[in-house]
């Protein structure tokens, strides 16, 4: 009993310590971000690394959820005599929830692991120390550039997921019951207004912040050689995915309150 | 126990020597990692143009000392003055201004593995000089030529040997024309011939650039070849400081044992 409470106490202490360290790390990144030079070249490189290279994966994921939604929703809606609602159901579900969350999770897997492993490897081979010794701030060069790229790129990738999801949803629908893409969109977007699209898409900026921040933090605090690099990559994915899901719960509630 | 031998071997009070002559003063520095006391009141002075080799067994805090000097670690207590400037309490900008005056060679070179050899050497130049691309290119070639690596500009660090990586690391450390050079185990893990080449290279560069150098090593022959003075560390303290000859003739048991094993 005593050992259980001791272990619980240790876990709580470690969690608090982790959040404290994350706060200090965030503060250093903010301080680094507002001072010159702004590392534009590295930011552009990260846009390519995080954005362009994630494009095929998010497009494929979007297409997959669009297809599954069309196939699954169709049988349910037919059963309740609401087959005409299928385009609206697909489009609304994708742009409101599935597009943003799937993009967040896919990017946290690909980018979170990548950043965690890359920075972790740089840490254990003293490359981050070498950057510091060269009188360059690693919080700016390595962390800020990646976090900014994640924040900017996530909504753009979400648009790709949304488009591919809707398109694949149309393809799956039209194979069973032919309908033009124009009509599919018209029917689907009839009940959707701009705020239905805007707020969910831009909530992925928060997902980007979480993914970038957690992955950079885990990577730059790596200890213990190659084993530590593996741990950092894994924990970056696990923690960023977990926090993306938790943030989604909070943000969905906030969006419902502010954009009823 | 600490024996004073050379003129430059100064204790805590003497360490405040003329700033014009002194490049680096380490005074009564303590550093612990948790319960482990790594440095226990270490004091050293290095004058301009001098090369001091810091010797000792593994885990005696030699590399930690270099990391304290360059500001990668912070000391628990004591004082480190670089060219008359105390580093304790210096902000990031102040420390960076000092870092530009210092070159650091890491034990495993720490080359950026996503950059080519030339890009590694150009890295500090891109950030701290207003050189045009062509001037920078010329300076990179000049630096790589000085370490005998001018033919490997486009290679990635993973494609070159450990000795070659150290050469490139040395070129990168010299890129901003530093006044102080800190070398962490420059010959560790290298065969005797490559070690000798690195020693010759360090000597040549010291001559060309009139550098003040602190070299951390457990390679006694390398220390003898490239340094004016040696300091032997044990359990976080300087056991003995002096020329190679003075240390070799010492009656201190630890020094005699170290020399016997290392020779």
Image (cartoon, rainbow, N blue to C red):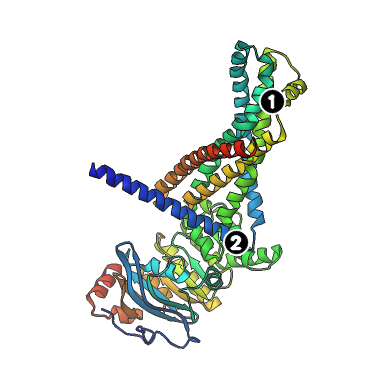
Chain letter behind tag 1: A
Q: Position of residue B120 (x, y in %)?
A: 57, 59
The structure residue drawn at horizontal position 56% and vertical position 37%, both measured from the top left corner, is: A253
Above or below, comparing residue A44 to residue B24 in the picture:
above
| Quadrant (top left, top right, bottom left, bottom right) of the N terminus of chain B | bottom left
Q: CA distance from mark 1 to mark 2?
A: 46 Å
* In this rendering, position of residue B255 left or right of residue B62: left
Choose between A253 and B101: the one closer to the eye: A253
Above or below, comparing residue A58 to residue B218 in the picture:
above
SS for dot 2: helix
The structure residue drawn at horizontal position 47% and vertical position 69%, both measured from the top left corner, is: B70
Q: In this orientation, does residue B115 appear?
A: no
| Quadrant (top left, top right, bottom left, bottom right) of the C terminus of chain B | bottom left
Q: Position of residue B171 (x, y in %)?
A: 55, 66
**Mark 1, residue position:** A167
The structure residue drawn at horizontal position 50% and vertical position 69%, both measured from the top left corner, is: B201
The numbered mark at residue B252 is: none
Q: Position of residue A94 (x, y in %)?
A: 63, 29
In this rendering, which labeled residue sits more in front, label 1 or label 2?
1
Q: In this orientation, does residue B20 appear?
A: yes
SS for dot 1: helix
Q: Position of residue B71 (x, y in %)?
A: 47, 68
* In this rendering, position of residue B193 left or right of residue A91: left
* In this rendering, position of residue B221 left or right of residue B90: left
**Mark 2, residue position:** B123
């Amino acid at each position: 009993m005593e050992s259980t409470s001791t272990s619980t106490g240790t876990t709580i202490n470690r969690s608090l310590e982790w959040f404290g360290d994350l706060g200090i790390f965030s503060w250093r990144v903010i301080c680094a971000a507002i001072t010159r030079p702004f590392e534009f070249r590295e930011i552009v490189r990260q846009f390519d690394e995080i954005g362009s290279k994630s494009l095929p994966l998010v497009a494929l994921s979007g297409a997959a959820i669009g297809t599954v939604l069309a196939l699954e929703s169709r049988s349910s809606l037919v059963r309740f005599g609401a087959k005409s609602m299928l385009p609206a159901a697909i489009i609304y579900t994708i742009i409101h929830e599935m597009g943003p969350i799937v993009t967040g999770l896919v990017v946290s897997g690909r980018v979170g692991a990548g950043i965690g492993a890359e920075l972790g490897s740089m840490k254990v081979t003293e490359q981050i120390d070498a950057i510091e010794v060269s009188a360059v701030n690693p919080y700016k060069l390595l962390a800020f550039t990646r976090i900014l790229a994640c924040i900017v790129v996530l909504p753009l990738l979400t648009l790709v997921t949304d488009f591919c999801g809707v398109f694949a949803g149309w393809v799956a629908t039209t194979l069973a019951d032919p309908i033009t893409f124009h009509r599919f969109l018209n029917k689907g977007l009839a009940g959707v207004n701009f705020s239905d699209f805007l707020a969910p898409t831009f909530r992925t900026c928060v997902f980007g912040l979480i993914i970038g921040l957690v992955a950079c933090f885990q990577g730059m605090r790596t200890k213990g050689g190659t084993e530590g690099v593996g741990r950092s990559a894994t924990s970056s994915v696990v923690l960023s995915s977990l926090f993306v899901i938790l943030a989604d719960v909070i943000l969905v509630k906030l969006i419902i309150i502010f954009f009823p | 126990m600490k024996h004073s031998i050379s003129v430059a071997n100064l204790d805590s009070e003497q360490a405040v020597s003329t700033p014009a002559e002194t490049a680096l003063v380490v005074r009564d520095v303590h550093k612990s990692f948790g319960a482990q006391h790594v440095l226990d009141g270490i004091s050293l002075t290095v004058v301009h143009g001098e090369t001091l080799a810091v010797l000792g067994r593994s885990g005696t805090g030699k590399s930690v000392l270099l990391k304290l000097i360059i500001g990668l670690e912070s000391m628990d207590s004591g004082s480190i003055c670089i060219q008359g400037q105390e580093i304790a309490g210096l902000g990031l900008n102040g420390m960076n201004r000092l870092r530009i005056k210092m070159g650091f060679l890491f034990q495993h070179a720490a080359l950026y593995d996503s950059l080519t050899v030339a890009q590694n050497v150009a890295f500090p130049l891109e950030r701290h000089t207003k050189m045009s691309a062509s001037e920078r290119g010329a300076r990179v070639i000049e630096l790589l030529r000085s370490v005998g690596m001018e033919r490997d500009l486009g290679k990635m660090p993973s494609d070159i040997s450990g000795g070659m990586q150290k050469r490139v690391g040395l070129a990168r450390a010299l890129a901003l024309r530093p006044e102080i050079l800190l070398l962490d185990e420059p010959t560790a893990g290298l065969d005797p011939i490559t070690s000798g080449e690195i020693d010759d290279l360090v000597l040549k560069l010291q001559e060309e650039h009139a550098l003040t150098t602190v070299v951390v090593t457990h390679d006694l022959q390398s220390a003898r070849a490239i340094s004016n003075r040696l300091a032997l560390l044990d359990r976080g303290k300087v056991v003995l400081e002096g020329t190679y000859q003075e240390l070799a003739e010492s009656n201190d048991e630890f020094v005699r044992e170290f020399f016997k094993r290392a020779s």
